[in-house]
Image: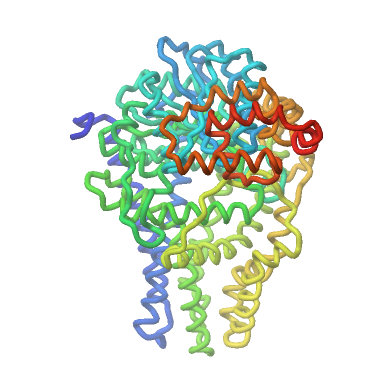
Amino acid sequence: MSEHSGQIPWQATALRRRVVFFSAIAVLTGLATFWLGANLPSELGFLWKLLVVVPFAVLFLWLALGFMTAVAGIWVLNFGGQNRIASAPTSPLPQLQTRDTTAILLPIYNEDIAYVYAGLQSIYQSLEKTGQLQHFEFYILSDSDDASNWLREEAAWSALCRTVGSVDRIHYRRRKHRTKKKSGNVMDFCRRWGKRHPYMVVLDADSLMTGDALVRLVDAMDRNERVGLIQTPLYTIGLDTLYARGQQFVNRIYGPIFFAGLHWWWLGESQYWGHNVIIRTQAFMGHCHLPKLPEGGALGGEILSHDFVEAALLSRAGWETWLAYDMEGSFERPPPTLMDSLKRDRRWCQGNLQHWLIIWAHGIPNLHRFLLLGGIMSYISSLIWLGWLVVLTAIAVFYPKLTLIPLTPENTALLVMTLFLLFFYKTFGIAQAIRKRTVEHFGGILGLSSSILMETFLSMLTAPVRMMFYSKFVVQILQGKRAVWGTQQRTGGGLVWADAMREYGWISWTGLAWGVLLLIANPMTFLWMSPVIAGLVFSVPLGMLTSVQTSLKTNLFRTPDEVAPDYILQAFEQNYAAMLANPCMSTRDLFIRVLVDPLAFKQHMTYIPQRTNVPEGTRQQREELVKRLLEKGPSSISNSERLVIMEDAEMLTQLHTQVWQLPETQFHEHWMSKL
């Protein structure tokens, strides 16, 4: 049974909108598919025509879906505004009346500690500026399995609490066992502290959210008791590689349009993107225990991309899930380079393909089934595109004198229609910037136009590269090869030639061979496919070019967040510099400090539970470890052995005492000199 029953006003609106939305997509796709099929050369057999038309129809459908979402977004931004779940960003900030506190969760795993804690401090300060800090508590939820990172997190937590003058509002917890990764980390919080907080805001390690946004989210939840989740729009900030700045520009110029468009046809059945979201804690605890998929290959076991599934489970239980499409003040960092983005996509690809098993689960709302399918198609479509291009190449080779798509008026109309859907939405971004009078924030009309042209050029070149990698990912996953779900690379750049050749060389050679084959077999098909071939051939220099650092003073890819940054972005830069200068960041080996420094030892002991009933075999192993550490020093033990020591109060106490009893020469050589 669902938590809530009965027709809700927005549901009738959503039904009407979705009928219009998907009907328009069907008409566009049907028209384009009919044009293509009707104008293929008669010399082609039925099977060849089928292999050309069917993949085209699938690919065009997803193209039309994106275009119609942009059209809906323009409508909402200019004529809509109804069915908004959170108060408008220009309205007065609500005053929260609740006595309860909202938990702000920061799950981390071997992250850049200075960045994480500077971000948390900035959020804290932004909430202070609203005068409503008392309604929030912070939880740093660590899954770190690197001993040095763990100890640095503890020290940074202590330093942060001293800096902001609060030890009862910022909490730190580290799990010993990283069960179910991030989703398990959040659920562990729910089991321990969930009943204390009606809502929880889930962040990522690189998230920033303004106090204004957080207050509006809590107010929206208070006013809408049917709502289980509100996702905020994510805006990328903070990096200066060409690739990252391009992503930040795209996100800022087109993001509001697509967020508004998604809201228009999602309404109360929104997706959840993993972070920068507020969730009703009891609803999450009651319905979001993730099932374990049947073992077998890369698609079995724990669900990796948990967010889409959790939104679907909440909707199945009758809870509404919304996108606060026009909310400002919700930020994250993009991957610094194209390769870092692709490595992240390898993990997401595996997680999304797992959703094929979830789609068929009992009671999942139809829209969420479609959204889960959309996540799968975001990767499968690349394999379909690649297969379609291979079919066109095969036709070019087997029918060398045949012009597959002659420039007839019908085919010209189809080409114009396709290009229109691909690129016309970009003019919407310019129109919105002019309407909102933010053109200067994008570098002026010249800078804005140049940025759009450069981004279009780069996206045309990188699209074939993504196609090749995504196709490779899908094939690997179907072969049973699992992704390593580790710490995301959040900074960096400057790809050197050797690394670029190693990562992209196979694509360049493939593109070169493909291009030569087409040029010899069928020059006209080569011309049609030249944009794809160019992206493949030049993938190595493209990977290097997009990884270079760019000047923030240039108008290329300039965004409002650079020209007129929010308070939280300015505070973050100051806090990050201060955190980097903090002694807890500069100490070379905090493991040694914990064993040598009485204050550090005492602080760490507060996190360690007392062990009881240690098996005799384990006790002997640990005695041997203590003996080796005292005789040969810290360099003689591994990271996993350091973790064993850091998690055992008895061993820590024994070592802390015995280290100070070592001969002076040995004490200084192995211990004090390494601090």
Q: Where is residue 212 in the image (x, y as percent from the top left)?
A: 54, 20
Residue at the (76%, 38%) spot, across then down: 670
Q: In which quarter of the image is residue 643?
A: top right
Q: How many marks?
A: 0
Q: Is residue 256 above or below residue 480?
A: above
Instruction: Please name whichever residue, 421 or 48, is drawn nearer the observer in this view of the structure.
Output: 48
Quarter-wise, where is residue 509 in the image? bottom right
Left or right? Give the position of 4 relative to 112: left
Residue 156 location (% of width, % of height):
65, 27
Query: Does residue 243 lie above or below 198 as drawn?
Result: below
Q: Quadrant of the N terminus?
A: top left
- Residue 249 appears anywhere in the view: no
Residue 401 screen position, x and y as percent: 53, 90
Name the residue: 27% across, 43% down: 365
Image side of residue 69 versus residue 317, left or right: right
Q: Quadrant of residue 338?
A: bottom right
Residue 201 vs residue 612, the one in the foreground: 612
- The quadrant of the image that shows the C terminus is top right
- Can residue 315 be seen in the rendering of this structure? yes
| Residue at 40% in and 38% down | 264
| 145 vs 79: above or below | below
Image coordinates for residue 14, horizontal then vertical, percent: 31, 38
Q: Relative to 567, does residue 391 appear above or below in the rendering?
A: below
Observer-nearest residue: 637 or 537?
637
Q: How is the image coloured?
A: rainbow
In the image, 462 versus 556, the foreground residue is: 462
